[in-house]
Image (cartoon, helix red, strand yellow):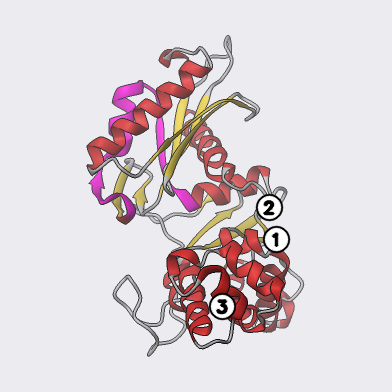
Amino acid sequence: MADAARPEHWIGFDLGGTKMLAKLFDADFKSVSRERKKTRGADGHEAVTHRVIRTIYGALEDANLEVGQLDGIGIGVPGPVDQRTGLVWEAANLNWNKVPLGDILEKEFSCPVVVSNDVDAGVYGEYRFGAARGSRTTIGIFPGTGIGGGCVYDGQMVTGRGVTCLEIGHVKVDREGRLCGCGARGCLETVASRLAVSAAAAQAAYRGEAPHLLEAAGTDLANIRSGVLADAIEAGDKVIEDIVKRAAHHLGVALSNFVHLLAPDTVVLGGGLVEAMPQLYVNTVLKSARKNVMPCYVDSFQVAAAALGDDAAVIGAAAWARQVVRDRDHK
């Protein structure tokens, strides 16, 4: 718990993506310093956690602070975690399995550490400071290589007892559909992820139906990024627009089920596809969701593009850590 006689300092950390980002925040969650390092290139959990530790020290050094002046650390990890213990069950992109990240960082920095899923942290960031500020209940959906999801319900991050939840990307939309990376068939990710969109776009380019995309990126999935897709649509590749709309429609259908379950005020959409074409994507998802909900829910929610970008997970992780620490102290 922060000492009333000195300023508070909280670290927010995002371990998702190819780079790790640490930010030091004051009590008002204004950024004091930041430190970024590459995630890739450090093999094994020991090498990655060592880089995490060095990144946090770098943020403290930039602010001329000692470890003892740190009130807590919130870290978002790309995978299911146990928030109670700080255990990372698995993080496929990091080749992690049952890594006690919370314990490792608490021993190093002698302060409370709260480990969250990175999407949960991002949704909490948008709830507190971004596109969903002022909402009672928020659902966040982030289509990328997969599809991440999270929910904040009446100020609390929704999780299971010993593992994070809201795996929206693995909601079934077609029982006989394509094989998903999780091993099941017909998951939402197989039809609505950025990877699924890029694969369909590559096929269209190969068939000669998307000449602008073919000229700009060829048919290599590694080159067909969200911005390239947006440029192809702008240049007149109607088939690419149809592919994106179809994916967004599927996501809207899945979202309608969560509207019935949780009645959110705000649904936040993030990720590269949304950033590259916010109006097209958001409007299609909203239209699809409204078409598939009961009449009493049609006007009960809004769909908005995420507002915080790369900062959502770091500020969300830090703010959630402070809330968890304060709740523990008040019990």
Q: Looking at the picture, which amino acid does disc 2 mark? A: Ala
Q: Is residue 111 left or right of residue 59?
A: left
Residue placed most toward the observer, 274 or 154: 274
Q: Residue 159: percent from the left, percent from the top?
A: 44, 54
Q: Is residue 161 left or right of residue 69?
A: left
What segment is highlighted magenta in the picture? 93-119
Q: Residues within 10 Å of mark 3 (few under 14, many from 20)?
A: many
Distance in Å between CA atoms under marks 1 and 3: 17 Å
Q: Is residue 306 magenta?
A: no
Q: Looking at the picture, which amino acid does disc 3 mark? A: Ala
Q: Residues within 10 Å of mark 1 (few under 14, many from 20)?
A: many
Please tell me whether mark 1 sits on a helix, a strand or a loop: strand
Distance in Å between CA atoms under marks 2 and 1: 8 Å
Q: Which mark is residue 146?
A: none
Q: Is residue 103 magenta?
A: yes
Using the rendered image of the protein, determine whether residue 249 is visible from the camera's viewpoint.
no
Residue placed most toward the observer, 245 or 260: 245
Look at the picture and state if 56 lies above or below 179.
above
Q: Residue 208: percent from the left, percent from the top?
A: 55, 87
Q: Which mark is residue 304?
A: 1
Q: Which residue is mark 2?
A: 132
**Which label's residue is closer to the chain start, 2 or 3?**
2
